[in-house]
Image (cartoon, rainbow, N blue to C red):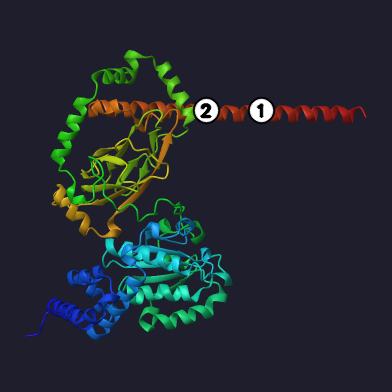
Amino acid sequence: MAECPTQNKAKLISETRRRFETDYVTEKSDKYDPRDVERLQQDDNWIENYLFWRHNNVDETLKMLDESFQWRKEMSVNDLTESSIPRWLLEIGGIYLHGYDKEGNKLFWIRVKYHIKDHKTTLDKKKLIAFWLERYAKRENGKPVTVMFDLSETGINNIDMDFVRFIINCFKVYYPKYLSKMVIFDMPWIMNAAFKIVKSWLGPEAVSLLKFTSKNEVQDYVSVEYLPPHMGGTDPFKYSYPPLVDDDFQTPLCENGPIASEDEASSKEDLESDGKETLETICSEEQTALLKKINITEHTSKAEENEKVDSKMKAFKKPLSVFKGPLLHISPAEELYFGSTESGEKKTLIVLTNVTKNIVAFKVRTTAPEKYRVKPSNSSCDPGASVDIVVSPHGGLTVSAQDRFLIMAAEMEQSSGTGPAELTQFWKEVPRNKVMEHRLRCHIVESSKPTTLTLKDSAFNMSDKTSEDLYLQLNRLLESNRKLEDHVQRCIWFQQLLLSLTMLSLALVISFFYLLYT
């Protein structure tokens, strides 16, 4: 009876593991990092990647493992951190992870115009490549990446064949099975000869993974939302460091502060009780004072309230905005507003509205998970319903304008459960191309804040109904103010037009009399 593929795979993995231990580790143990040897004994998927790349030939796989492990120790791959890389290399933005291709593979950007051949910096640049690939491999074990080789604005000074060969070897030997394809964008004619050499390094099978593209053709592989404008895309992303771009939205947030693992997140019941206790501890006098401010008709005149909103709008010409995604409408659309340290730390609100006919799971991530508390950070939203997400600085830490938030959402089947365990399993299995993502920047308010987006601590002592009423009232006030501003602008424009016509008429009359009497 023939062995099934699963049994055959397990047999190959076991044989590779045994032979590497007896034939290589015994003789070359000092050439390998013990952590790699230990991982090889535990990680079947890692061995499978090497076997796959060598067509299940154990002898060839062992040679590849030997070469790869020696390189990993020479480069100290397991110890590479941000501090291992010169800061200027991280700041320049020549190499980074950002976005996805149409197949859901992560994009690994190499902006060649930022690379100038210099043997003094070659090792650091190689470490930067290894740093990103190792960082990605540990998080997404086995998921391929698409290399975006951006050759726009490059010339002869940017050609460094040794560096290109290193990148090729990373995917041929050191990180097998990780290359989905390599998209070569806008290659100058002067580099045609160089890339003929590259093709010989890749081998016949890998050559098919090279995709030479122009501005029109690149959209066959990556949609415009993840392409920069110079590639014909609409992605507003602009590289900056710190923090590490895009890839830094990986640490989960916890409702009660930062955690190391999503499995440690509290259950919904714990969250509800925690929220209830928090509400009970807030001062009742603050609630009364806030309610007086909210109840415009009973405690303050409409004219006075409009005047307050107008004064705030002069400082913030930011009307309430909504991002309308295919699964969720998200408010605010672009920026979260926080109070400055001088004015006291403030909480801010994200409102999610499910616009589908199915349950939508969502979770919130940030570039600075050590700073923020988010309630809820990993939950679900019923069809047509809305969820308020409260974001607050954790432990008195300061909000930074460089901090960003990522909201991820995906539709769930009606039969799926929405408990913490079910949600954790759901996010492990959902395909990347089924996930909606939206990013929000942080904005620090120095003297005042947009009343629609930022709430004082006491605001969270109110009932959901009161919070909703406040939200709607302020929305109407801001909308009225916006219309008033538009009306004033039209009046000013009309007045200027009338003045211009009057001056023109006067000039014509003077010219007429001048011609008549001369």
Alpha carbons under labels 2 and 1: distance apart = 16 Å
User: What crowding class fits label 2: few (fewer than 14 Cα within 10 Å), some (14-19), or many (20 or more)?
Assistant: few
Q: Earlier in the sequence, mark 2 or mark 1?
A: 2
Q: Which residue is mark 2?
A: 487
Secondary element type, mark 2 = helix
Counting from the top left corner in percent of width and height, residue 199 is at 44, 81
Q: Quadrant of residue 345?
A: top left
Q: Quadrant of the N terminus?
A: bottom left
Can residue 109 be seen here? The reply is yes
Counting from the top left corner in percent of width and height, residue 351 is at 30, 38
Q: Outermost residue toward the left?
A: 1
Tell which of 35 and 243 is nearer to you: 35
Which marked residue is nearer to the observer: mark 2 or mark 1?
Answer: 2
Counting from the top left corner in percent of width and height, residue 348 is at 33, 35
6 up-or-down from 360: above or below: below
Which amino acid lies under the numbered mark 2 shown in the image of this protein?
His
Q: In the displayed structure, does residue 356 sit left or right of residue 10?
A: right
Q: In the displayed structure, does residue 220 sit left or right of residue 254?
A: right
Q: Which residue is mark 1?
A: 498
Q: Quadrant of residue 470?
A: top left
Q: In the displayed structure, does residue 399 sit left or right of residue 460?
A: right
Q: Quadrant of residue 476?
A: top left
